[in-house]
Amino acid sequence: MSAENAEDAEDAEEERRFAADRGDAGERLDRALVRHLAGVPGLSRTRLQEWIAAGRVQVNGAAAGRPAERLALGDQVTVLLPDPRSLAPSRRPPPAPEEMPLAVLYEDDWLIALAKPPGLVVHPTFGHWEGTLLNALLWHLRATGVRPGFVSRLDKGTSGVLLAAKSGEVHGRLARAMRTRAVAKDYLAVVYGSPAPGTSRGRIERPLLRDPQDSRRMSVAAAGRPSVTLWEALAGTAERAGGVRLTLLRCRLLTGRMHQIRVHLRAAGLPIVGDPLYGEPRWKGISDVDLAAACRGFPRQALHAWRLALPHPVTGAPLALEAPLPDDLAGLLAAAGLPRS
């Protein structure tokens, strides 16, 4: 493209702005964009994911990090639309079924619960179009014609329970329930440090905001969205005086912000072992050489979505789901001499 043509393309880009209204509050960013950008030629969820990954979408002045980010009432959203000439319908096909291992915890006519292994991306996105948990789920349901939808997400490095709906109506019911205290979401986390003496449980209530310097991260900020995490210490290592201890925590989410547990525990002085974004190299202070090596080499954040309890969205019956510990986390607990919950 010549310099003249490049300038023409830049001039042809259009900036759209909108403030999140009541219909957007608590909604996924990509879904809100579909509604506000109705009429844009070639618009699709896949194309929106590409724009978000390319930094073309900002929320409150910071680049949006992921399509599943939830909007709050009044959030200011800016979208830089590419040259309309480039907006031909996307040729990328929809996610395809792929034969992959799948651990099913529960399934009925309306929903399915899976145990997500660590290191697996949940949904196709920029840079991860294939080999995701959704591709595996589509294979599992290939004979039914169902196009499932995940009700929540887990980071690539986090393991545990994930729920998917088999229809749009059930998805809506589950999504509404997830935003209330009708759903109990418990996680297990192995952290460096220990609670204050005589304290075995607590409440972390700190607002969270996307880090304006790094869209991959969240940070504690007075202007952020209200965020609450409850924690309980289940067990801890017995280190000699002055040494770094490990503690196994059970964490319950009362809100569902991006990276909430990871940021809250870091802010409380209890960073999660192996966390690549919010962790600390405290393994250096562990006197047990083997345990220090296990912590140093742990390949991800030691966080597991352990239990999920909710009323069934159709029958109303209590539904309790539990994902077994993956091998890497079970091995870390064994090395630390901590019970497997």
Image (cartoon, grey):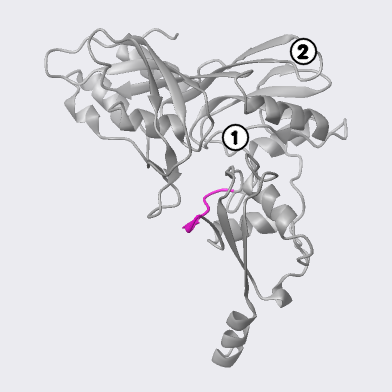
Above or below, 336 relative to 165:
above
Q: Work out which residue is located at the far left of the displayed protein and give it.
A: 241
Q: Nearer the viewer, mark 1 or mark 2?
A: 2
Residue under label 1: 153
Q: Nearer the viewer, residue 149 or 21?
A: 21
Residue 285, position as x, y percentages in the image: 17, 26
The majority secondary structure of the magenta stretch comes to loop
Residue 167 visible? The answer is no
Residue 304, position as x, y percentages in the image: 49, 23
Asked if disc 1 and disc 2 are in contact, CB closer than 8 Å, the reply is no
Side of 341 relative to 267 (left or right): right
Element marked by disc 2: loop
Residue 315, position as x, y percentages in the image: 81, 13
Tag 2 or tag 1, which sits nearer the N-term?
1
Residue at (76% x, 44% y) in the render: 96
Q: Nearer the viewer, residue 172 or 101?
A: 172
- Chain part drawn in magenta: 60-66
Residue at (15% x, 19% y) in the render: 243
Q: Nearer the viewer, residue 113 or 29?
A: 29
Residue under label 2: 316
Task: Find residue 185 and report its image quarter.
Answer: top right
Side of 85 relative to 297 (left or right): right
